[in-house]
Amino acid sequence: MPGLVVFGRRWAVGSDDFVLPGAFELFVRLVWWIGILALYIVHKGRFNCPGGGLLHSYLLVLLVLLASIICALSALVYASMQGTISNPGPRKSVPKLLYARLLLSFPEFIWAVVGAVWVSDSSVHCEKTVINVIIGTVIASWVIIIFTIIGVVIAFDPLGGKKTFYLTGGENRNLESSQTEQLLYNVKNAATRVWEKRIRLLCCCIVQDDDHRVAFTSIAELFHTYFSDTDLVPSDIAAGLALLHQEQDKMESCPKEPEDVPCYSPSSLGTDDLGIELENAAHYMVFAAAAYGWPYYIYTNPFTAVFKLGADCCRNRRTDSDITGSDRHNFHFGSILKITGLQYRDFIHISFHNKIYEIPFFVALDHKKEAIVVAVRGTLSFEDILTDLSADCEDLTLEDLLENGFVHKGITQAANYICRKLINDGILNKAFTIAPEYKLMIVGHSLGGGTASVLAIMLRNSFPTLRCYAFSPPGGLLSKSLADYTKHFIVSVIVGKDLVARLSMPNMEDLKRRIVRIVANCNRPKYQILLHGCWYEVCGGNPDNFPTELDGRNQNALTQPLLAEESLMVHRSPSYNALEEESRLHSPPQYPQLYLPGKIIHIVEESSSRGLCSSDTKYTARWSNERAFSSILISPKMVTDHMPDVVLKALRSLSQEHRSCMSC
C-alpha cells in the first residue's frame, strides 16, 4: 500500500507483497542452484559425450544465471521487508529491483528453450542421469515462467493507467476545473465498465436478458463506488482483517462493565415466550432448509443421499402437485419430501423456476402446526447472487405507515414475483380452500429469509394473522420504520457472528474505515501481520499485541483523520463521511441505514467439545435488537454460522433443551 507503480501504471500489488512469494522462489532457486552445481562438479571432465560441449556451456551459463536471479531475489525480498504498510518510503528501491528481476526472465526464457532443444536432440548420448536432471531443469524453468505470467495477469489492474494519474496527481494538478471533472467522469465510467465486464465474465454460463444487463450495470456501479475511494490492494485487506480479528478478540476477552452488557427480555419487546419461539423456529427451519432441494440433502447426508434419491427418482410420480420449473430426475422434489417428511398431497405448489429476481419456493400444508407454509429458497445460483447484489434502495409504501419505507431492491423484486404468483395464480386461494382454518406462515433462509420478510409485509393487510420466520436474513433489508412495523409478525433468527446478517452498505463502509485505520497505524511490516494472522486463525493462541502508532495517543484524536489514513484515502464517499461522528459537513449517506426485520433471536455458541467422530456444542439464545448487528465481526465462523445446517442444529439443540426443562 499504496498500489505499486511500475511501467507507468498502478498494479494490484503493493511494494511489500514480494516477501512471501519471493522467499519461496528464493528457496527453490537455491536448491536448484546447489543441485546444478553438484551435478557440474561430479561430472566435471566427463562432458566428452556427443552433445557434451553444449551441455557444459549450458550448465555454466545456468549456474551464472541462477546466481544472478538469487541475488536479485534476495535484494527484492529484503527491500520488500522494509517499512510498514502505510510507509512505503523505505521500499522505494523495489520498482528498480523488480525491473532487474524481470529483465533476467528474458535470458532465463532463452535458456529454457536451449535446454528443451538439447534434450530433444536425438544425437545426444550422454549419461542418463545428466539427461534426466536437464529435463527436470527445463520443466522447472517453464513452470516458473508460467507462474510468473499468471502472477502478472492477476496483478494487472485494467484501470492502472488512469489510476496512476488519478492517485498521484494529488492537489497539484495543473488542470482547469472542467478538465478535472471530465477526467474523473471518464475514470468512473471506465471503472464501471471494467466491473461490468468482470461480472459478465463470471456469469457467462447463464442466459442474459434485459434484467441481467440492468443488474450488471447497477452492481458494477456499486462495486466501483465502494472500492474507488481507497488505495488498497488485496493483501492490505487480508492484513486488515487479521488485525481486526485479533483486536476484536482482545476486546471480547476484556470484562465489561455491568451497564455495558446488553440485555433484552421478551417482555420489554412485547413478544411471546422465547422458548416457544425457539421451538417454532426449529420446526419451520426444516421447511426453509428443504427449499434448497437436493444440494442441501446431499450436503447433510453425503454417504446415503445419492442412493436414496436414485432409488426414488424412477418410481416417484409428481402428478399430485402443481410443479413448475425444471426438476430433472425428480431430485429436488424427492429431497424436499425426505427433509420435511410430508406427503405428496400436502404440497399445493412447487416452483423450481430460477431467474434474476425470480427465486424458487414451495407452498405446503403443515398439519402438525396447522399452517400453510410458504418456504422461499436462499442463494444457490448465479441468478440468486445477482439478486443479492442488487443492493440499491427503493420505496415500499404501506397504508399502516405514515412515512415510506426503504427496502433492498433485488429482494423486493423477488418478493413481488412470489406475491404475484401466490395471488394472481390463485395458489393461496387453493390452499385456504383445502384448509380454511389454517394460518399462513412464510419462512426462508438467507436470501429466502429476506424475501420472506418483504413478502410478509406485502401480504400482511390481506392476511392479518400471518407470521414469518426469517433465518439469517441479510442485514441491509428494511428501513427503521419498516423494521419496527415488522416486530409484530416477523421473527429473525441469527447464529453467532453470521456475516450475511450484518451485511449492509453502511456496515461495509464502516468495515473499510476500520481496515484503513488499523492498517494505517500498525507499525509492523505486512508479512509479519499475515504470518501471525494465519497462525492465529489455524492454531489459535493469544492475539498478538501489535504495537501501533496509536499507542499513547489521545483517543480524541481518533475522530480526526490520521496522516497515514489520509494518504490511503483517494476521496471519501458520502457513506464514509457519514460514519465519522465528528464530521463537520455531516454529509448524508449515499445508502440509507437498513436493518434486520422483526424481533431478533441471537443464538451464540457457549461451549464446544469435539470427539473423534462427533462434536457436542452448547448454545444459548437471547432477544436482541438491530443495533447489535450494526458492525461486521471478523471470525473464522462468520461464514459457517450462516449455513442452514448450522442454524438448524443450533435451533434443535435449544428446542430440545427447552422441552427437557419444561418436562422437569
Image: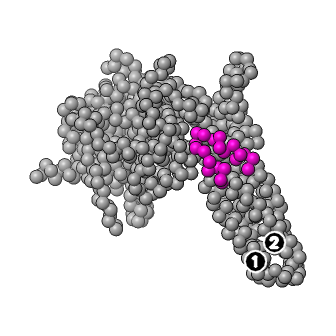
Q: Which mark is residue 374?
A: none
The answer to whether residue 402 of the structure is visible from this angle is yes
**Picture quadrant of residue 484:** top left
Query: Which region is colored magenta?
Result: 77-97
Distance, label 1 to label 2, CA atoms, is 9 Å
Q: Is residue 44 above or below residue 541?
A: below
Taking the view exactly as shown, the residue that stands out farthest to the front is 552
| 193 in magenta | no
Q: Which mark is residue 59?
A: 2
- Give the image location of residue 616, x and y in percent: 29, 59
- Give the image location of residue 246, x and y in percent: 43, 47
The answer to whether residue 426 of the structure is visible from this angle is no
Q: Is residue 633 above or below residue 21?
A: above
| 88 in magenta | yes
Q: Are the two marked residues, 1 and 2, in contact with CB atoms closer than 8 angstroms?
A: yes
- Give the image location of residue 43, x and y in percent: 79, 81
Q: Nearer the viewer, residue 495 or 339?
A: 495
Q: Is residue 88 above or below residue 54?
A: above
Q: Residues within 10 Å of mark 2 (few under 14, many from 20)?
A: some
Judging by the rendered image, the residue that carries numbered circle 1 is 39
Q: Nearer the viewer, residue 531 or 426?
A: 531
Name the residue rendered at 81%, 80% in the picture.
44
